[in-house]
Image (tube, rainbow, N blue to C red):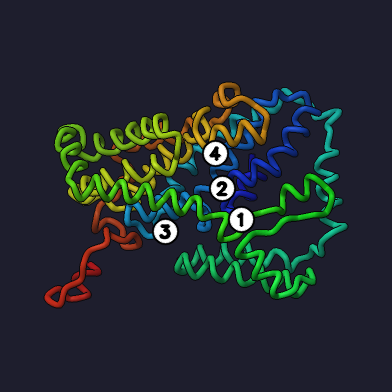
């Protein structure tokens, strides 16, 4: 689980982590006589944790944008829910794993992966520079767009300097994606990734979801729904619990974590603003309910993908995906006990909702 969390943090993709490290761990787990469903639960738990705190993750950026929150404020806020969930999950897997002695472990897939990388690529300390720079810049709260651009340029520069890739080919890979042709299946699966064009399906889905959300918002349909929910969302406790269950329901009926982030998120933003709750709490709730539970929906995009790459039914692994189960529970407990629900003026390091600037409103007052 920890290895998958780190890999997902660096790549910003839980799906890629599951399709590479996850597949390898399924083979290793079988060699240890560990049930595939248990291994899949550990893989997915780690992958979605790393994905949620990665500044280059598409769903992380989407949730922050929908809630009008600063990206790094959103990530820090996520640590308060997914952090405890991760620790609990680690302890659960630690004690469950003690029943397996490790004898007869099959590490052939891992050995094949490492050997394939060594034979086809130049791997050294320099190759760790891009992910390390991304983590450091993210920690220092550098603008998210700048972080992604810097990380991409560093990676491209190292590919040209150390791997012998032509500059023209590098630009082509960044736009259309890279297809690895080493002949080693494990390596090719790990390194074949799409570029900007490959991500357009996510962007277009975001456009559609935001357009639908905009129609519902500007025609005041969301306002009507909120009015009907008036008693439910009149305080922070009811608002966050309602948000969690609304996102879960949207996940079940839309089969898309992106729609489950966008529609409930935009619907509840005015309620968070009315209660003066910081946008990072809204964005965090979007992820705590919509994103982390996506792998548990067998007919959803996430569930279908994980079932396909890991060859394990979602009905089997969902009981072992502890992080996806625990995180929304923690979010609900925080709401019930009113802890870590920050409001405007309580934290200096978290932005308020975006507000228009006018000539009659001094910048200092606006910042305050």
Crowding at dot 2, Cα within 10 Å, few <14 / some 14-19 / many 20+, comes out as many
Instruction: In this rendered view, identify the residue nearer to me: 55 or 258.
Output: 258
Real-space CA distance between mark 1 and mark 3, rounded to the nearest whole angstrom: 16 Å
Q: Secondary structure at mark 2?
A: helix
Query: Comparing marks 4 and 2, which lies closer to the viewer?
Result: 2
Query: Comparing marks 4 and 1, which lies closer to the viewer?
Result: 1
* Residue 155 left/right relative to 342: right
Q: Secondary structure at mark 1?
A: helix
Real-space CA distance between mark 1 and mark 2, rounded to the nearest whole angstrom: 8 Å
Q: Provide the residue designation for mark 3.
A: 71
Instruction: In this rendered view, identify the residue nearer to me: 21 or 181.
Output: 181
Instruction: In this rendered view, identify the residue nearer to me: 243 or 251.
Output: 251
Residue at 50% from the left image edge and 63% from the top image edge: 139
Q: Quadrant of residue 69?
A: bottom left
Query: Comparing marks 3 and 4, which lies closer to the viewer?
Result: 3
* Residue 295 left/right relative to 249: right
Real-space CA distance between mark 4 and mark 2, rounded to the nearest whole angstrom: 13 Å
Q: Earlier in the sequence, mark 3 or mark 2?
A: 2
As displayed, is residue 243 above or below residue 207?
Answer: above
Marks 3 and 4 close (CB-CB < 8 Å):
no
Marks 1 and 2 close (CB-CB < 8 Å):
yes
Q: Provide the residue designation for mark 2.
A: 50
Q: Horizontal and vertical percent for residue 297?
A: 49, 29
Q: Earlier in the sequence, mark 1 or mark 3?
A: 1
Q: Provide the residue designation for mark 1.
A: 10
Q: Secondary structure at mark 3?
A: helix
Q: Provide the residue designation for mark 4.
A: 87
Q: Earlier in the sequence, mark 4 or mark 1?
A: 1
């Amino acid at each position: 689980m920890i290895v998958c969390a780190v890999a997902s943090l660096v790549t910003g993709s839980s799906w890629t982590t599951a399709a590479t490290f996850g597949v390898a761990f399924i083979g290793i787990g079988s060699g240890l006589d560990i049930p595939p469903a248990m291994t899949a639960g550990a893989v997915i738990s780690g992958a979605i944790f790393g994905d949620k705190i990665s500044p280059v993750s598409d769903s992380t950026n989407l949730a922050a944008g929908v809630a009008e929150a600063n990206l790094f404020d959103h990530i820090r806020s996520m640590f308060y829910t997914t952090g405890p969930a991760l620790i609990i999950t680690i302890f659960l897997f630690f004690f469950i794993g003690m029943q397996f002695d490790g004898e007869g472990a099959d590490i052939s897939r891992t050995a094949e992966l490492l050997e394939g990388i060594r034979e086809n690529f130049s791997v050294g300390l320099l190759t760790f520079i891009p992910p390390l720079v991304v983590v450091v810049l993210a920690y220092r709260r550098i603008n998210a767009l700048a972080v992604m651009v810097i990380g991409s340029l560093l990676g491209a520069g190292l590919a040209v300097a150390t791997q012998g890739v032509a500059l023209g080919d590098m630009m082509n890979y960044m736009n259309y994606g890279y297809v690895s042709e080493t002949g080693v299946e494990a390596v090719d699966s790990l390194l074949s990734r799409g570029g900007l064009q490959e991500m357009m399906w996510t962007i277009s889905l975001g456009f559609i979801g935001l357009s639908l959300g905009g129609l519902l918002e500007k025609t005041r349909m969301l306002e009507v729904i909120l009015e009907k929910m008036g008693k439910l969302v009149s305080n922070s406790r009811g608002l966050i619990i309602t948000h969690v269950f609304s996102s879960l329901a949207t996940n079940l009926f839309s089969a898309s974590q992106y729609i489950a982030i966008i529609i409930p998120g935009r619907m509840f933003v005015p309620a968070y603003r009315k209660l003066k709750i910081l946008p990072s709490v809204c964005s965090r709730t979007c992820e705590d309910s919509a994103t982390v539970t996506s792998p548990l929906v067998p007919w959803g995009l996430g569930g279908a993908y994980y079932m396909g790459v890991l060859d394990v039914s979602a009905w089997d692994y969902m009981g072992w995906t502890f992080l996806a189960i625990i995180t929304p529970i923690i979010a609900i407990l925080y709401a019930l006990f009113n802890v870590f629900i920050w409001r405007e003026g309580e934290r200096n390091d978290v932005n308020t909702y975006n507000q228009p600037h006018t000539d009659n409103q001094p910048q200092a007052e606006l910042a305050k």
